[in-house]
Amino acid sequence: MTYVYVRGVPALLALAALIVPRAETAVAAEPRDPWVRAWGANHGGQLGNGTTADQQTPGSVQGLARASVRELSGGGGNANNAFAVALLTDGTVQSWGGNLTGQLGDGTLASRPFPATVAGLSGVTEVAAGFHAAYAVRGGRLLSWGDNTYGQLGDGGTVSATRPVRVQSLNKVKDISAGCHHAVALREDGTVWTWGRSHHGQLGLGDSTDRNTPQRVPGLTDVVGISAGCHHTLARLADGTVRAWGYNVNGQLGNDGMEPGPSPVEVRHLSGVTQVFACGYHSFAVLDDGSVRAWGWNGFGQLGDGSTVARTTPVPVPGLDEVTDMAGGWRHTVAVRSDGSVLAWGENASGQLGDSTTTDSPIPVAALPAGSGATRVSTPTVGKSSYAY
């Protein structure tokens, strides 16, 4: 029997009046259309639908078919700088949204509310979007573009770029993740490299000194997964444990404290982890039994545990299982399950939960139903928008 939770108290799904009616309203549109879906805040045109109007239910991104997208990453925040990049199955990249610092990579500073190709990029295998910058992996090497105030482009300088430039001295890269002003790369040998801003120790190098070229995080080996939050970072090790470093005022390092962690620490009470997701100021782990653990900031219910209490160590997210992907912005979280249903929780002021309301929810509500075709989700780094594809 399926259970849901309201402020930590189990209740039968048939009695969950807070969830079901909202879910039914949210999915009145055709759930199985072939397009990438987006909803929530849209001030910068980050929903890619040709407008700058907020949207409370999932709508189509112009001309972007779900089957043609290999990876999508939302970047930016809540104002005119929010944007997104999408890696297509043919190895090219498209971008749309705010462009105040050249984060669309098209050689201009003009925002654009619909997708267009980033010229000169092909053969790309991974992408990531930060607050004002974006990254692409090609042939094991990295390209970056956008804001470079803190050296987050990794090219040895601090001059912003409106077209892709090379990240220095790094090869055999298998994955890239971007925080607000820092970047994290995972190499094929299981080592982790970071660069950019480090005022909260988010580079994991033991200090708060910014770096404009990649540096190896000491003491980390056998890493198989990485994820960057706004000012903190998570790394999943081959043994199923997790390391975290950086900003920790809200407990997002999960080590039962709130002191900054400029070097990696072990997230407590976690084992058998198969995926990690660092959100704006909170974190999640999916375990090998399909359950989900959450920790960090929870002021708007973005942990999904039915409360608004910050957690300094991982706690279960009741009723959430079979998760294939997750993402979290500033105050909300989205997840997709193996049946194609998309759930969201936390703040909803801009409709970022996708349930046709602007009412916050500390428990998951449905944005898209089972069978929607979605397998992945994304959000801007600290924004109020959501994507499913």
Image (cartoon, rainbow, N blue to C red):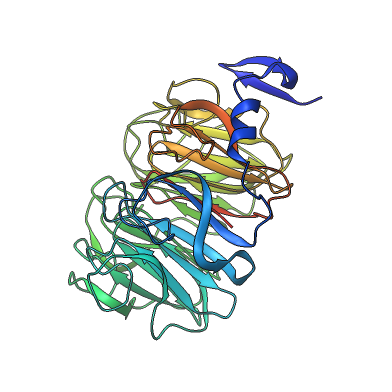
Q: Residue furthest right?
A: 1
Q: Is residue 201 left or right of residue 300?
A: left
Query: For the C terminus, which image quadrant?
Result: bottom right
Q: Is residue 233 left or right of residue 81?
A: right
| Image x and y of residue 47, in percent | 42, 55
Camera-side residue of 54 and 181:
54
- Image quadrant of residue 181? bottom left
| Residue 2 visible somewhere in the drawing | yes
Q: Is residue 48 left or right of residue 21?
A: left
| Residue 218 visible somewhere in the drawing | no
What residue do we see at 46% from left, 26% from top?
311
| Image x and y of residue 66, in percent | 61, 64
- Image quadrant of residue 280? top left
Query: For the N terminus, which image quadrant?
Result: top right
What residue do we see at 42% from left, 44% from top?
329
Camera-side residue of 228 and 25:
25
What residue do we see at 40% from left, 36% from top?
331
Task: Give the answer, above or below, for where 19 lies relative to 202.
Answer: above
Task: Give the answer, above or below, for where 99 lies relative to 9.
Answer: below
